[in-house]
Amino acid sequence: MQSAKTTVAHSALDTRGMPGKLAVALWQEHMGSLYDLRVPKKLPEAFDVRVDFWHLESALIGTFKGPAQPWNRSRTCIGHDGTDSFHLLVLRKGWSAPHGGGALVSPGDILVCDMAQPLYMHGGDNELLTLVLPRNLLARHLQAPDEHNLHRLPSADPLAALLKDHLTNLHARLPDMSREQAEAIIPATVHLAAAAINGTTRDEQLGSVRMAMTDRICKFIDTHIHERELSPETIANQFGMTRRNLGRLFESYGGAAAYIRRKRLSLVHASLKRSRNGQSIEEIAEAHGFNHYRSFALAYQKQFGTSPREARALARKGIAFSAVTDGKLEPWAYWVKDLK
């Protein structure tokens, strides 16, 4: 007997037909933690927004259609929500550009947004196809993974065009796919996205063996990240290689030690967001392998643009806010924030 197919989780928000005041408020509730949204001085009669997302376990893919508005994500906003993912935006209609000048994003182009870095954009009425990938899933395949915020992939680029076509076809077929089928396509999607962003295929640069080894080591680090003994030395011993060769594999991250530190800081940040946690900041830092508070605080400030104490204070405000809106948000709003 054949088991029933498990469908891909889907969630949508549609403000069409709502009064403008209600639509703007609903949009603010859904996106206000991710972006510094401003309420229009004069509320429109209508504010038509349509958002839908499909949850593929380790990735999200969806569409957006909405009116002209600024898209600003400040350091304060980053410190508040701790979202650490890449958003690949395929512009279908409209236009977009960074504040203060920069390359205009036109229909067919893809814009890479690193949600761990500030961004200030504005544009016209837009239709987007969006792929959301956790940092730890995509960054390991990128050259200089921290240098791709607002990276525009022009439609004329063959790899960008291939990625756009792949995402368009995948999105169109998701309603008929099982969850297992959708999950199975994610590794190929990630490698294609990395190839388009890097401007070449990763295999041509590192070779498939080295890439597979890097993936294995990243998974090992993720599994053992809470262990104090985890270090470049222990990793090199585990995989039977020299520290020098390990360093070459993690060169784009600044080395294996830098990769471990970033992962641990992200875990601390997530813990600080749970402000009901009774642990002190010092205790949380020490539990994640940071024995010197000053060094930890400086590293945290550098990565998130805010101090640990400021981040905890912002998180407490966020919990007070979410207590008011909890239960009113569509699931996709939580998916985008919580994807790890």
Image (tube, grey):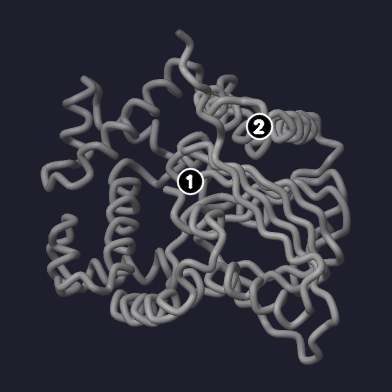
**In the image: residue 165, left or right of residue 4:** right
Q: Secondary structure at mark 2?
A: helix
**In the image: residue 54, left or right of residue 157:** left
Q: Secondary structure at mark 1?
A: strand
Residue found farthest to the front: 1
Q: Is residue 2 above or below residue 210?
A: above
Q: Which quadrant would the N terminus be assigned to in this image?
A: top left
Which of labels 2 and 1 is toward the front? 2
Q: Which mark is residue 285?
A: none
Residue found farthest to the bottom: 41
Q: Is residue 31 above or below residue 87?
A: below
Give x and y (percent) for residue 244: 30, 31
Q: Nearer the viewer, residue 198 or 308?
A: 308
Mark 1 nearby-residue class (10 Å; few <14, some 14–19, many ≥20): many
Q: Residue at x 62, y 55 (%)?
A: 113
Q: Residue at x 34, y 57 (%)?
A: 266
Q: Residue at x 62, y 75 (%)?
A: 28
Please name the amino acid that badge 1 sits on.
Answer: Pro
Q: Residue at x 43, y 64 (%)?
A: 82
**In the image: residue 40, left or right of residue 224:** right
For marks 2 and 1 on the same chain, the one whose residue lies earlier in the sequence: 1
Give x and y (percent) for residue 269: 32, 64
Q: Nearer the viewer, residue 43 or 140?
A: 43
Mark 2 nearby-residue class (10 Å; few <14, some 14–19, many ≥20): many
Q: Which residue is mark 2?
A: 174
Specify the quadrant of the image occupied by residue 277: bottom left
Please name the amino acid that badge 2 sits on.
Answer: Leu
Q: Is residue 8 above or below residue 331?
A: above
Q: Nearer the viewer, residue 311 or 337?
A: 337
- Circle count: 2
Give x and y (percent) for residue 19: 78, 78
Q: Which residue is mark 1?
A: 134
